[in-house]
Image (tube, helix red, strand yellow):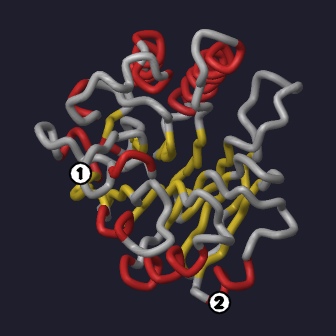
Amino acid sequence: MKVATFNINNVNRRLPNLLRWLRSSKPDVVCLQELKSTDADFPFREIRKAGYGAVWRGQKTWNGVAILARKTEPVLIRTGLPGDARDVQARYIEAAVNGIVVASIYLPNGNPQPGPKFDYKLDWFKRLRRHSATLLKQNVPVVLAGDYNVAQTDLDIYPTRSWDKDALIQPKSRAAFKALMAQGWTDAIRTLHPAKPMFTFWDYKRNRWPRDAGLRLDHLLLSPALAPRLTKAGVDRDIRGEDGASDHAPAWIVLR
């Protein structure tokens, strides 16, 4: 089973890129983030024609998450992260696909920091840890896949000081991610590529894609029940170089 995560950065604008990638890569499960589409405008007909069932939660202008499944229908479990009924941002969706629980996550960016947006990011992390602990107690195979908006270590960002004040690399952001991992999750890509940067994001500004000035923000975390099935992991970085591309590239894993 091939599971991928892809911050598509506007699913309708990047739909041709998404469909080309689906045809060439043939992932079995895809977690999409940053749909920038309402529920009604999500292109489910085109995605279904490409051979994928889908569940999604859209939001006008910003956010939005989806889970696609090849030649089957995802079984929707939830369309939001528990713990705060006031939070209406579309950042979490969870479904079952072929015996695996899959979550598509779009964690808050947190900029500017310090400030309310950074506080929201850290609070969202706390809620995610509470929910992920519940999933672990169930001892089922789980993939938490998505854009975590954290470059966890210096290996996950190109050599620079220009991001020093950014929420993506703040000590509190990294500590929150580390606390999540400490529950027993496996960082699939870093496990199989311990010494390579494996960037997944290149900002549009300052010629960062041609310079390979990237960050690894997109992660696939595996529960202990699933981690032994991991066989391959990678990033389809060439997708970032296409015309009209998202500023992210798909990251993927293969499970036995």
Residue 244's x, y, as percent?
50, 71
Point out the image quarter for the C terminus.
bottom left
| Nearer mark to the viewer, of 1 and 2 | 1
| Residue at the spot 50% in from the left edge and 36% down from the top edge | 148
- Image quadrant assignment for residue 107: top right
Horizontally, residue 86 falls left or right of residue 23, namely right
- Image quadrant assignment for residue 214: top left
Query: Among all residues in the image, which is located at the extreme left?
Result: 195
**Chain-order first, disc 1 or disc 2:** 2
Helix, strand or loop at label 2? It is helix
Horizontally, residue 80 falls left or right of residue 19, namely right
189 vs 106, nearest the viewer: 106
| Residue at the spot 58% in from the left edge and 22% down from the top edge | 125
Disc 1 from disc 2: Cα separation: 37 Å
Which residue is label 1 attached to? Answer: 211
Residue 69's x, y, as percent?
57, 70
Q: Are marks 1 and 2 in contact (CB under 8 Å)?
A: no
